[in-house]
Image: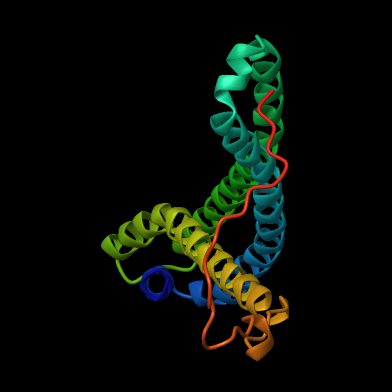
């Protein structure tokens, strides 16, 4: 993530140095990136939790089917369990499609941002002037790469937040789950000479 952030700042620096007064749009660009990652991160985190909850029933279903496959075949209930499994599969894929939709939304917004930045850069180069034609060409080239850099940075940030959230849930589970305290009462105490006598007694045996 830090490598992606460093590359993003280097890219913005190259764009700002290509044309005069281009640095004016940099704060607006950084503010837009911050707002995008803020809303995208919240939505992605909620959809991640929904994805985990939606996948839990199908994992349980597959485990139960693998343990009771002989009974399912013996009772001829394969079609019923197949229909139930397909229904659970459809339910588990809904959060995945929602995440795919917000990823497409992020790509569209970033492409529009890059387009607006390129138009602004070209307008400043034509009306105000630039360092050189090569600098303008380099700036426009880096603007074309800006969308992929920002998307990569936001995805890395989301993955980091997701990993930290998983670690916090594990820590909360370990901290809040009650544990049995090991003590002397857990193991029954027996006499030192136990068993002092061994025998087998059969009473009222009937083999009808």
Is 117 drawn above or below residue 197 in the view shown? Answer: above
Task: Please name the residue shown 68% across and 67% down the image.
Answer: 38
Residue 179 figure quarter: bottom right
40 and 171: which is toward the camera? 171
188 and 113: which is toward the camera? 188
Residue 110 visible in this rendered orientation of the protein: yes
Q: Position of residue 204 (x, y in %)?
A: 73, 41
Q: Position of residue 79 (x, y in %)?
A: 66, 11
Q: How is the image coloured?
A: rainbow
Task: Please name the residue shown 65% across and 25% down the image.
Answer: 85
Is 42 drawn above or below residue 194 in the view shown? Answer: above
Task: Please name the residue shown 42% across and 68% down the image.
Answer: 129
Marker count (numbered): 0
Residue 19 visible in this rendered orientation of the protein: no
Q: Considering the image in quadrants, where does the N terminus appear?
A: bottom left
Residue 46 figure quarter: bottom right
Is 107 drawn above or below residue 28 in the view shown? Answer: above
Task: Please name the residue shown 67% across and 12% down the image.
Answer: 75
Q: Position of residue 33 (x, y in %)?
A: 60, 66
Q: Considering the image in quadrants, where does the C terminus appear?
A: top right
Q: Position of residue 120 (x, y in %)?
A: 54, 59
111 and 174: which is toward the camera? 174
Residue 40 figure quarter: bottom right
66 and 125: which is toward the camera? 66
């Amino acid at each position: 993530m830090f490598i992606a952030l460093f590359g993003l700042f280097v890219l913005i620096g190259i764009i700002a140095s290509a044309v005069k007064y281009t640095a004016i749009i940099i704060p607006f660009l950084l503010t837009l990136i911050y707002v995008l990652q803020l809303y995208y991160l919240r939505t992605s985190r909620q959809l991640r939790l929904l994805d985990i909850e939606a996948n839990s029933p199908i994992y349980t279903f597959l485990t139960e089917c693998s343990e009771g496959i002989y009974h399912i075949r013996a009772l001829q209930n394969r079609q019923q369990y197949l229909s139930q499994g397909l229904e659970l599969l459809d339910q588990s894929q809904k959060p995945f499609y929602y995440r795919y939709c917000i990823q497409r939304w992020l790509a569209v917004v970033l492409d529009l941002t890059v387009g607006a930045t390129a138009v602004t850069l070209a307008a400043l180069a034509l009306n105000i002037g630039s360092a050189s034609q090569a600098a303008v060409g380099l700036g426009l080239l880096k603007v074309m790469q800006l969308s992929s850099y920002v998307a990569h940075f936001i995805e890395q940030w989301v993955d980091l937040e997701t990993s930290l959230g998983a670690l916090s849930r594990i820590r909360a589970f370990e901290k809040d789950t009650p544990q049995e305290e090991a003590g002397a009462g857990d193991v029954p105490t027996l006499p030192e000479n136990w068993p002092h006598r061994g025998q087998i007694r059969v009473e009222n045996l009937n083999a009808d």
